[in-house]
Structures are given as C-alpha cells and as structure tokens.
C-alpha cells in the first residue's frame, strides 16, 4: 500500500501488512487508509509524530475556523516552543510528564507564564481532536499542569512622578489626552471611544488624594486652550 512520498527522495513510500487471515490484513489496511487520509501517517511511512500532528491540526482543523491573526499566534507558539526532540515523539507514545517537563523548561527560560499557558492550550486542543478521531486513547495533556499566570503588581506614580511625566509630555501632540488620562482615571479604550467628555470634580475620585484638585485645574486650562486656540495669542 502506498502511504505517500518521501520528502527527500520524491519516491513512493509503501507499507506492507501481514496477518494470520485475509480479514485481519484487510482490517489493518482499512485502518491505515483512515490514518493516511487524516494525516496521521508520516510521509516516511511511520506513525505520525506530535510535530506532524500539530501542523496537520493547525492547517486542517484550525485555519478554516479562526481569524488569521489567531492562527498565526498558534503557529508561532508551535514553531518556536515545541522542541525538535518532543516534536519527533510518535503521537501514541507521548506522555504527560514530557509535556510537564516542557512547561518547566520554558519557565526556566523565563518565558512568560501566559505564553506557556497558550502553548498548553494549543497542545491540549490538538490532542483533544486526536482523541475525538480515535487516533489516541486519551488526552495526555489533561494530566499536565501549566504554570499559573503571574500578575505583575501595578506601579502607581507618585504625585511628583505624575508631575514629571506631564512636564515631559507637554511637547507632544497627545498631551491633552495624557492629561485627561492622568486626571480622570479613564481607561485608554474609554478615552478613545468618547467624542466628548464632560469633566467634573467627581471624575477625579479615582485619583490619589491631594492630586485631584490640581489635576482638575490643569485639565480645565488645557481644554480651554484646545477649544479656543486664539487664547494663546492673547
């Protein structure tokens, strides 16, 4: 039975089946045909490896159903962070501890915990699809645990720091926006999504004590200049 072409020589790759009866051989051939059609047989005739299955899963099962940017993120995760040795492991011989060792190794490389979790999500989803198709008995990624996402502590500027920031930002065209962000506590998306903003002292309740009155006064002056450019001339 021809299962593909050798990518190095271009020649056909043949696989032979043996059994005690014709029926046993026929069952093996039918099973192999199913695996070939699903991309679970390596071009060289052996069992498909984790790396080969991840590529098949990306192209066949994900690319048609997700945004291009999402697919590219998945592809980069697989290409950069699945080492060659693990990628060469036959799918049916993959063990949970190998995935766990991968996650630990990535932590030692100081890879962001979010990236490691995304790597786990991609591998888990690919193996889940393999289980659905009956190619492996269970999803070994279920027994592997990625690291928790480490949240960085927010560094809040002091009143002096805010003053220095605004002084440096004064020469930029987005200075009014920076000033509004500092004074109001609006998120960037909220700021960009509003065509007009009504500023009141209540808006500054999120700002650290002692800063809100100064911020309100400065912001009022900035907005007046924006509304009446001739004010500078006067």
Image (spheres, rainbow, N blue to C red):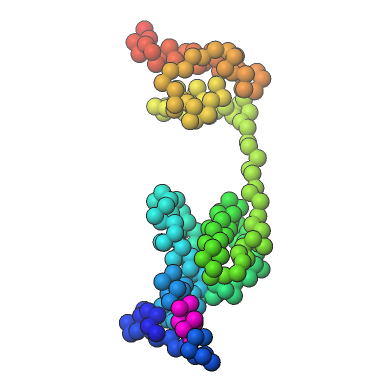
Is the residue 41 above or below the residue 22 in the image?
above
- Kindly give the residue lying farthest to the left in the view shown: 10
Nearest to the observer: residue 173 or residue 10? 10
Residue 61 is left or right of residue 165, and the answer is left
Looking at the rendering, in which quadrant would you find the C terminus? top left
Answer with left or right where residue 226 lies relative to residue 113.
left
Query: Please, which residue is most extreme toward the bottom here?
Result: 20
Q: Is residue 6 visible?
A: no
Q: Which residue lies at the image location 61% right of the left edge and 53% below the top edge? A: 113
Residue 42: x percent and y percent? 44, 77
Residue at 50% over, 22% down: 180
Q: Position of residue 171 (x, y in %)?
A: 42, 27
- Main secondary structure type of the part rendered in magenta: helix
Q: Position of residue 59 (x, y in %)?
A: 41, 61
x and y percentages locating residue 73 in the rendered image: 46, 54
Using the image as rendered, state which of residue 92 and residue 70 is in the foreground. 92
- Magenta segment includes 31: yes
**Above-or-below relation of 51 to 147:** below
| Image: magenta residue range | 25-32
- In the depicted structure, whether residue 207 falls above or below residue 137: above
Q: Relative to the observer, which residue lies in front, 133 or 45?
A: 133
Residue 216 image-quadrant placement: top right
**Residue 205 inside the magenta-drawn segment:** no
Q: Quadrant of residue 4?
A: bottom left
For residue 157, say whether it is visible.
Answer: yes
- Is 49 on the left or on the right of 155, as rendered? left
Q: In the shown orientation, is residue 221 left or right of residue 212?
A: left
């Amino acid at each position: 039975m021809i299962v593909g072409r050798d990518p190095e020589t271009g020649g056909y790759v043949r696989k032979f089946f043996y059994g005690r009866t014709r029926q046993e051989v026929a069952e093996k051939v039918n099973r192999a045909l199913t695996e070939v059609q699903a991309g679970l047989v390596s071009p060289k005739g052996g069992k498909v490896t984790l790396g080969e299955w991840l590529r098949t899963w990306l192209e066949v099962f994900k690319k048609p159903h997700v945004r291009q940017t999402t697919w590219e993120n998945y592809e980069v995760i697989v290409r950069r962070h699945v080492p060659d040795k693990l990628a060469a492991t036959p799918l049916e011989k993959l063990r949970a501890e190998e995935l766990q060792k991968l996650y630990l190794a990535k932590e030692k490389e100081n890879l962001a915990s979010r990236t490691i979790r995304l790597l786990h999500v991609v591998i888990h989803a690919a193996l889940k699809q393999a289980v659905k198709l009956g190619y492996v008995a269970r999803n070994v990624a279920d027994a592997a645990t990625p690291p928790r996402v480490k949240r960085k502590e927010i560094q809040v500027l002091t009143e002096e720091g805010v003053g220095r920031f605004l002084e440096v930002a004064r020469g930029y065209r987005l200075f009014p926006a920076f000033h509004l962000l500092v004074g109001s506590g609006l998120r960037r998306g909220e700021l960009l999504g509003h065509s007009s903003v009504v500023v009141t002292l209540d808006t500054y309740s999120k700002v650290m004590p002692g800063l809100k009155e100064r911020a309100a006064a400065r912001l009022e002056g900035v907005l007046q200049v924006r509304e009446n450019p001739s004010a500078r001339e006067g």
